[in-house]
Image (cartoon, grey):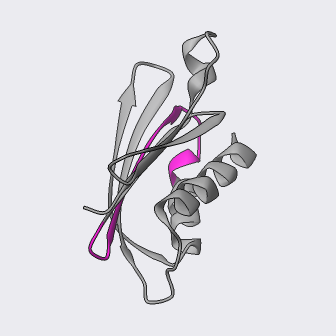
């Protein structure tokens, strides 16, 4: 397993085990901290977990963004968390052209989701 990145809202920090996260320091309501994005690399595979606000088309948009980043979609799982949130897990395989770091991958997904949400 290579690394992990968590993204919430505003701050990015790196952990000693080659992982990093972005966290929101706000003490506002639950939905202000969404989406949360986690990515892990293992060999040429990528696991992406996104906990986000439940909106129509968010899963399709996420899969389309993953494919734009030179990742081959393998599988996904989507669970409803309460009435207002989704937990999306995507497994993808890195294509030969894939050259992003785990941090860059999460930042690109975050940017795409921010525009959509």
Confirm whether the magenta stretch covers residue 17.
no
Residue 107: x and y in percent read: 61, 54
Q: Quadrant of residue 12?
A: top right
Quadrant (top left, top right, bottom left, bottom right) of the C terminus: top right
Residue 99: x and y in percent read: 52, 79
Q: Quadrant of residue 74?
A: bottom left
Q: Residue at x 46, y 19 (%)?
A: 83
Residue 94 is left or right of residue 8, and the answer is left
Quadrant (top left, top right, bottom left, bottom right) of the N terminus: bottom left
Q: Of residues 83 and 49, which is closer to you in this image?
A: 49
Residue 103 is left or right of residue 75, and the answer is right
Residue 16: x and y in percent read: 36, 46
Residue at the outermost right position: 115
Q: Residue at x 38, y 25 (%)?
A: 81
Q: Which residues are magenta?
A: 42-59
Residue at the outermost bottom position: 96
Q: Residue at x 60, y 10 (%)?
A: 29
Q: How many numbered badges does the structure rendering display?
A: 0
Confirm whether the magenta stretch covers residue 45.
yes
Q: Of residues 2 and 76, which is closer to you in this image?
A: 2
Q: Residue at x 46, y 46 (%)?
A: 20
Q: Of residues 91 and 82, which is closer to you in this image?
A: 91
Q: Is residue 115 above or below residue 95?
A: above
Whether residue 107 is visible: yes
Q: Is residue 60 above or below residue 88?
A: below
Residue 103 is left or right of residue 78, and the answer is right
């Amino acid at each position: 397993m290579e690394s992990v990145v968590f993204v919430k809202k505003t701050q990015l920090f790196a952990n000693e085990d080659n992982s990093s996260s972005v966290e929101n320091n706000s003490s506002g309501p639950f939905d202000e901290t969404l989406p949360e994005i986690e990515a892990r690399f293992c060999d040429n595979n990528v696991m992406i977990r996104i906990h986000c606000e439940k909106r129509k088309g968010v899963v399709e948009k996420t899969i389309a963004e993953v494919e734009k980043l030179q990742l081959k979609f393998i599988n996904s799982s989507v669970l409803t968390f309460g009435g207002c949130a989704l937990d999306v897990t995507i497994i993808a395989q890195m294509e030969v052209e894939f050259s992003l770091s785990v941090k860059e991958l999460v930042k690109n997904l975050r940017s795409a989701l921010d525009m959509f949400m």
